[in-house]
């Protein structure tokens, strides 16, 4: 019986399923995706911000008020071109997709997923609203922060700020690192909890319960400071409470390379991966290349609040 080789389409479908299941931040932010192919890295496209409407008092004399959606447009340059390529043997290409996935594909896609999540987390630098120091204040809103970063009730302070910014109460999340998670899980608030989450990645990252109106998650991609922070600078991990529309992940499918017969693009729910298979004549080995093109953008910094301590 002849061997049945894995094809780019089979690999791409499994890779995309892995990516969808293992990302954390990518699942929590606004995703913009269209089926238009991008010709090259660095192309600038325009994305629409989620629409905002205003509820008005109906007047029977004047009739209804037709509103133009206040959604706005934002230019974004697609310059994050992430690739994982690895050599495979003929024996590995004849594996069942389940075995191939366990040995090679899952670790490769995990690297891509972690890279995307880290890139989304860089958007925290756009946020100036901060909680985590009792007695501090947030510019532009009233009230004083009541809780320290290591107490899960600090999310109450973040909630207050988001409420004062008129942020919708749904689709709110709070994401922290291992250090903050360890502090929070020691609180009685978490001793009785039911697990939540929609995908494997979210279930594994979920802290186990809603936290004062937010779904809580932990990611190892949030790191603490490496040196000794200067006075007034964060001296802990920097968590973030945010609405889904605070940040955006923008993806577009890549064109299939000219002359590459063994290539396939797969897309699903705002994610797109390209798989190209070829032969490296210099090393005399088959190569599987998995790549994706995307960028990240802050849509509204007022819809996010940082959570961290501050060096004295």
Image (cartoon, rainbow, N blue to C red):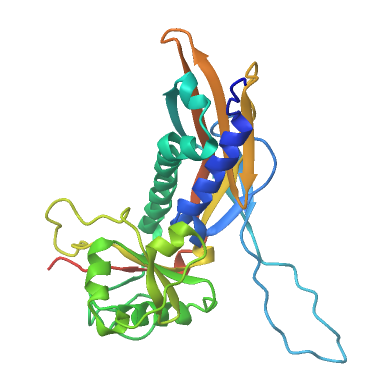
- Residue 160 sits in which quadrant? bottom left
Residue extending farthest front: 1
Relative to 3, is 25 above or below?
A: below
Q: Which quarter shows the N terminus?
A: top right
Residue extending farthest top: 282
Q: Is residue 29 visible?
A: yes
Q: Nearer the viewer, residue 125 or 290?
A: 290
* Residue 64 image position (x, y, % from top left): 83, 82
* Residue 185 image position (x, y, % from top left): 26, 74
- Residue 301 sits in which quadrant? bottom left
- Which residue is depicted at the point 41% across and 36% down? 103
Q: Is residue 81 visible?
A: no
- Which residue is depicted at the point 72% across and 85% down? 56
Relative to 298, is 174 above or below?
A: below
Q: Nearer the viewer, residue 164 or 25?
A: 25
- Horizontally, is 229 left or right of 97 in the view? left
Q: Which quarter shows the C terminus?
A: bottom left
* Residue 268 image position (x, y, % from top left): 63, 48
* Residue 214 image position (x, y, % from top left): 44, 75
- Which residue is depicted at the point 58% across and 22% down? 3
- Which residue is depicted at the point 46% across and 53% down? 23
């Amino acid at each position: 019986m002849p061997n049945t080789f894995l094809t780019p389409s089979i690999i791409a479908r499994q890779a995309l399923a892995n990516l969808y299941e293992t990302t954390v931040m990518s699942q929590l932010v606004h995703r913009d995706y269209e089926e238009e192919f991008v010709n090259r890295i660095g192309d600038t496209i325009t994305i629409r911000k989620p629409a905002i409407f205003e509820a008005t008092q109906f007047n029977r004399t004047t009739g209804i008020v037709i509103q133009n959606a206040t959604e706005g447009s934002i230019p974004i340059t697609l310059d994050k071109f992430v690739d994982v390529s690895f050599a495979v043997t003929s024996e590995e290409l004849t594996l069942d997709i389940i075995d191939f996935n366990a040995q090679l594909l899952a670790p490769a896609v995990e690297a891509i997923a972690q890279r995307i999540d880290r890139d989304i987390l860089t958007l925290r630098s756009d946020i100036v609203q901060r909680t985590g120091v009792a007695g501090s204040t947030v510019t532009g809103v009233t009230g004083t922060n009541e809780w320290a970063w290591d107490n899960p009730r600090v999310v109450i302070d973040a909630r207050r700020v988001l409420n004062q910014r008129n942020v919708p109460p749904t689709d709110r999340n709070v994401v922290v690192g291992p250090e903050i998670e360890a502090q929070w899980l020691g609180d009685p608030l978490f001793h009785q909890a039911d697990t939540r989450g929609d995908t494997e990645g979210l279930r594994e990252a979920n802290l186990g319960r809603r936290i004062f109106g937010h779904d809580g998650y932990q990611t190892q991609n949030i790191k603490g400071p490496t040196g000794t922070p200067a006075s007034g600078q964060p001296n802990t991990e920097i968590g973030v409470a945010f609405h889904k529309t605070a940040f955006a992940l923008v993806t577009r499918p890549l064109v299939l390379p000219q002359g590459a017969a063994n290539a396939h693009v797969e897309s699903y729910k705002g994610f797109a991966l390209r798989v190209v298979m070829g032969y490296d004549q210099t090393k005399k080995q088959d190569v599987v290349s998995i790549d994706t093109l995307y960028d990240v953008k802050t849509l509204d910094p007022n819809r996010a609040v940082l959570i961290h301590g501050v060096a004295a």
